[in-house]
Image (cartoon, rainbow, N blue to C red):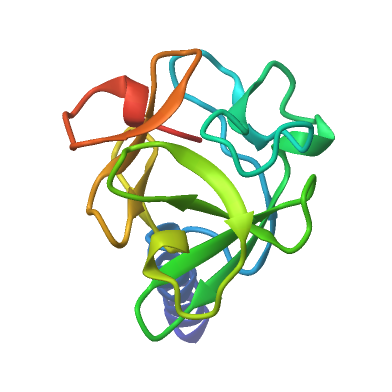
Amino acid sequence: MKRVTRVLFTTGVAAALAAGLSTSAHADGWVTWQHDVSGKCLGADSTIPFQPNDVRLYDYCTSYGAQWYEVYNGSDGTYLLEPKEDTGTCLAAYWDNDVYVEDCTAGNAYQRWYEVRTSDGWKLKHKATGRFIDSNGKDIYLHDENGGRYQLWH
């Protein structure tokens, strides 16, 4: 009986840990965000910095420009996304719905993102506007939540 209890306890703890871990996104570290529909990855293009089209979809998720370093802010549950391609810059968006990178600024809500888990993937929700990163398979922009796959990332 003791052995069965230990197995059940261990199984229960493992299930609880797995359930708890599956509801959070990523810890601080390197990630890629692959678009659900196109299969391409969100990335920064350092050849055209600080422009509305400097964030684009890369064909290959292993591309240097498609790598992001995420920093979690435990006080509000948001992430800061810094592209490997442009160190010292952060993914940002404002009310014009363009998504781009700009110099990181401490406490800037326009550079903070919620990673919202859905049953089909993740959505990147902008803290300041409440809108989501969306893509038509070519362009990257903010859009109101619409339940579509074009707002899903993996």
Left or right for 92, reference 76? right
Q: Based on the displayed image, in which of its 4 quarters is residue 29 positioned?
A: bottom right
Work out whether residue 126 can be spotted: yes
**Figure check: 123 above or below 9:** above
- Identify which residue is drawn at 79% across, 32% down: 47
Depth check: give the residue in front, 124 or 118.
Answer: 124
**Figure check: 9 above or below 139:** below
- Identify which residue is drawn at 24% across, 54% down: 129
Numbered label tally: 0
Left or right for 49, reference 120? right
Depth check: give the residue in front, 37 or 87.
Answer: 87
Work out whether residue 18 can be spotted: no
Q: Position of residue 48 (x, y in %)?
A: 71, 32
**Figure check: 37 above or below 146:** above
**Figure check: 148 above or below 142:** above
Q: Position of residue 112 (x, y in %)?
A: 43, 63
- Identify which residue is drawn at 40% across, 61% down: 110
Q: Based on the displayed image, in which of its 4 quarters is residue 34 positioned?
A: top right
- Identify which residue is drawn at 38% across, 73% down: 77
Q: Position of residue 22 (x, y in %)?
A: 43, 58
Left or right for 133, reference 65? left
Quadrant location, the N terminus: bottom left
Depth check: give the residue in front, 129 or 5.
Answer: 129
Q: Position of residue 3 (x, y in %)?
A: 52, 79
